[in-house]
Amino acid sequence: MKYFAKIKYLGTDFHGFQVQPGLRTVQGELCRALGEALGYPAKVTGCSRTDAGVHANEFCMTVESDGATVPPDKLPIAVARFLPSDLSLFFANECDQYFHPRYDVKEKEYLYRIINSRIYDPFEYGRAWFVSRPISEKCLSRMNEAAAHFVGKFDFSAFMSEGSDTEDTVREVSYLSVEKNGDIVEIRIRADGFLYNMVRIIVGTLIEVGFGRISPDFIPKIIDSKDRSLAGMTAPAEGLYLNRVIY
């Protein structure tokens, strides 16, 4: 049987999604737990490859296991007792054998969380980027002005980590917003795909725009330049969440 499933996880203690020898990964834990629950080895194929420390509110995948007889609606319950506390499989359905969780994606949405407070909150450890310098309404206005320049179909080479071997660097961003509620700043971005560290570099650039280090009007020039050195810092992994996958 081939299952389509959704998971969520806290990435703090994982070395990313993909299996790596000798390291604790999301895929590794899933294969182990599903094998025990189903009674047969399980092949897990994910919609993306999240990095170490990155979280997921909704990560989609397929599970293939020869001989498995667990009904899809029972799979989340069957596997729950074999999973660690920082990983949950919360939805499963049967899917077509030709469906691919990565190549059939239309869009992905990422959420980036920032704690903007002078005093560190230990309950947000590993779950958000702590920025103590005040992000004012003026900063937010500048950040949203800059955000508008990212929406569209562009070559995002300037917002990709150096050393990446991706050849096709054109992506289409359909939505990007910056909102603040109390001490929490949330940046949401939706696109048909993302380059390596693209979201984190965009977030770092928006922060530098907010603090006046980069002008909002300079964003198109950075995009056109395809030069990583002109964009802002790479925001830390702990604030990043794969939030939604659209098929």
Image (spheres, rainbow, N blue to C red):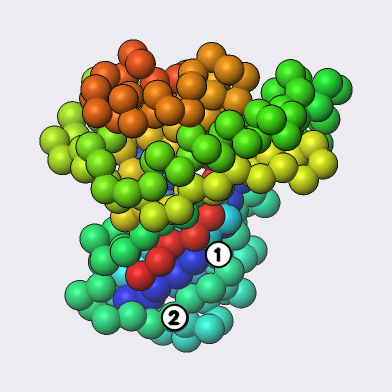
The relative height of residue 113 versus residue 192 in the rendered view (above or below) is above
Most distant residue in the front direction: 217
Q: Amino acid at mark 1?
A: Leu
The relative height of residue 202 versus residue 56 in the rendered view (above or below) is above
Q: Residues within 10 Å of mark 1 (few under 14, many from 20)?
A: many
The picture places residue 40, in percent across and down from the top left corner, at 37, 68
Camera-nearest residue between 140 and 20: 140
The picture places residue 47, in percent across and down from the top left corner, at 35, 56
Q: Secondary structure at mark 1?
A: strand
Q: Residues within 10 Å of mark 2 (few under 14, many from 20)?
A: some
- What residue sits 55% from the left and 47% below the top? 177
Q: Amino acid at mark 2?
A: Asn
Q: Which residue is mark 1?
A: 89
The picture places residue 181, in percent across and down from the top left corner, at 77, 45
Residue 130 relative to residue 149: left or right: right
- What residue sits 40% from the left and 24% below the top? 218
The relative height of residue 108 versus residue 94 in the rendered view (above or below) is above
Q: Secondary structure at mark 2?
A: strand
Residue 199 relative to residue 169: left or right: right
Camera-nearest residue between 95 and 165: 165
CA–CA distance between discs 2 and 1? 12 Å
- What residue sits 49% from the left and 60% below the top? 244
Q: Which residue is mark 2?
A: 93
